[in-house]
Amino acid sequence: MIRIDSVTKRYPDGTVAVDRLSLEIPDRSITVLVGPSGCGKTTTLRMINRMVEPTEGTILLDGEDVQRQPVTTLRRSMGYVIQNAGLFQHRTIADNIATVPRMLGWGKRRARERAAELMERVGLDAALAGRYPYQLSGGQQQRVGVARALAADPPVLLMDEPFSAVDPVVRKGLQDELLRLQDELGKTIVFVTHDIDEAVKLGTMVAVLREGGRLAQYAPPADLLSHPADAFVEDFLGADRGIRRLSFFPSDALELTTDAVVPADAPAERLAASDAPYLLVTDAHGRPLGWRERGSGGDRLLSYGRPFRPGTDSLRAALDCAVLSPTGWAVAVDADGRVTGVVSQQTIGEAIRAAHTQAAPDPDADAARGEDEKVAG
Ligand SMILES: Nc1ncnc2c1ncn2[C@@H]1O[C@H](COP(=O)(O)OP(=O)(O)OP(=O)(O)O)[C@@H](O)[C@H]1O
Ligand SMILES: [Mg+2]
């Protein structure tokens, strides 16, 4: 575990970048530092691997003061990934990834094998091994940066806005990939971002910092969204925090109905028998084709929007489907895309209210937790 204990960093010009920060960073999980520009995120990260030395306070790694450890040993135990990957431009991708193993005295062959293994791990085509960084896309370069940081298998990974320089689609891909990789590798990751959505998506724990390097709140993302500590955090979380919080509630308890689901070749009596205002028409494999308005005998179907998968998708996804659907009903499908039922906006609304009631802690427990947070923070 990394323990940051009342750490302050005052730069020589008097700037207080970090102000009495205390954090317990749990092992084998992703801890995100998030906050506006200049709030001391990078400074905090760099104090962990001693690229910056604290003015006051201590940082403990597995109970040992990092100040007492030789810098080289310390850095070897911590991979470091930055924005734009920071690759060596005159070295090939494979050589970039093998940098640390080579420094550690690994033979050429072993280092190359390790590079190949890591390229596969982070989703890079082996054919890219001989290229130079400028011959790769931004997203690919970021993957190389991650592979390079993992090369010597360090227990800790420090990541400073690693995905900020790529477009939203690539960024989402890299985030998903990081979560998958973390499932496999179980590193202790400290991840810096100024994007609260990224923080909420990736973090097991999220530390919100405010200007002056002070901790505003340290909590799991769902708690952050449900109980922002103050107006600053609430403002930082943004206007749609209620909707975003729905990502943490599963959709599998939603009551689906199949009454309004009919195959395209259903006999006319079957269509007439239903009194639903819209019928969801499915193809021969049970996949959705679109909505037919009751009484509109024609072939014209309304779009069924984007279906959701109960059990995999959250209540947020289900609600989004219903909102996007021209009928106000969301379509549920299984892994093969076959319709398992439909659900109305109203039913989803009821499920949301029920989830909120269940999730709301009783006021006494809340007060006790507030005390705990004060002790921890
Ligand atoms: N070497 C330095 N000398 C003086 N002040 C510095 C130095 N490095 C950083 N600072 C100041 O310390 C504060 C925190 O900087 P830091 O880089 O840690 O912020 P950050 O949260 O990473 O910001 P950003 O989101 O813009 O990357 C800022 O006010 C910055 O100007
Ligand atoms: Mg920074």
Image (tube, helix red, strand yellow):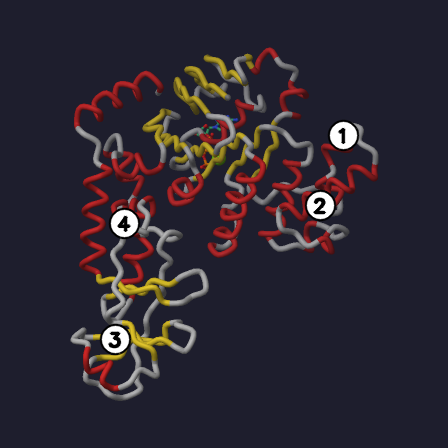
Residue 77 lies, with reference to residue 57, above or below; the image says below
For label 1, the residue is: 103
Q: Which of marks 4 and 3 is in front?
A: 3
Indicate which label's residue lies in the foreground, 3 or 2: 3
Kindly identify the residue that appears in the image at 48 percent across and 56 percent down. 169
Query: Is the residue 253 above or below the residue 1 in the image?
Result: below
At x 21%, y 32%, the residue is: 361
Please tell me which residue lies in front, 41 or 330.
330
Looking at this view, name the residue that lies furthest to the bottom: 298
Q: Nearer the viewer, mark 2 or mark 1?
A: 1
Look at the numbered disc 1 and give the secondary structure of its residue: helix
Q: What residue type is labelled 2?
A: Gln
Neighbour class for label 3 at 10 Å: few (<14), some, many (≥20)?
many
Q: Measured from the top left, where is residue 120 in percent x and y?
A: 67, 48
Answer yes or no: is residue 210 visible: no
Disc 3 from disc 2: Cα separation: 59 Å
Where residue 89 is drawn, which disc sits there? Answer: 2
The relative height of residue 176 versus residue 262 in the rendered view (above or below) is: above
Question: Which label belongs to residue 243?
Answer: 4
Q: Which mark is residue 137?
A: none
Q: How far apart are marks 4 and 3 (CA)?
A: 28 Å
Q: Is residue 173 visible?
A: yes
Under tag 3, what secondary structure? strand
User: Could you say where residue 31 lies in the image, as x and y percent from the top left?
Assistant: 45, 32
The earlier-in-sequence mark between 3 and 2 is: 2
Q: Nearer the viewer, mark 4 or mark 2?
A: 4
Residue plotted at (53% across, 30% down): 188
Q: Which of marks 1 and 3 is in front?
A: 3
Label 2: state its secondary structure.
loop
Q: Mark 3 = which residue?
A: 279
Q: Is residue 9 left or right of residue 341?
A: right
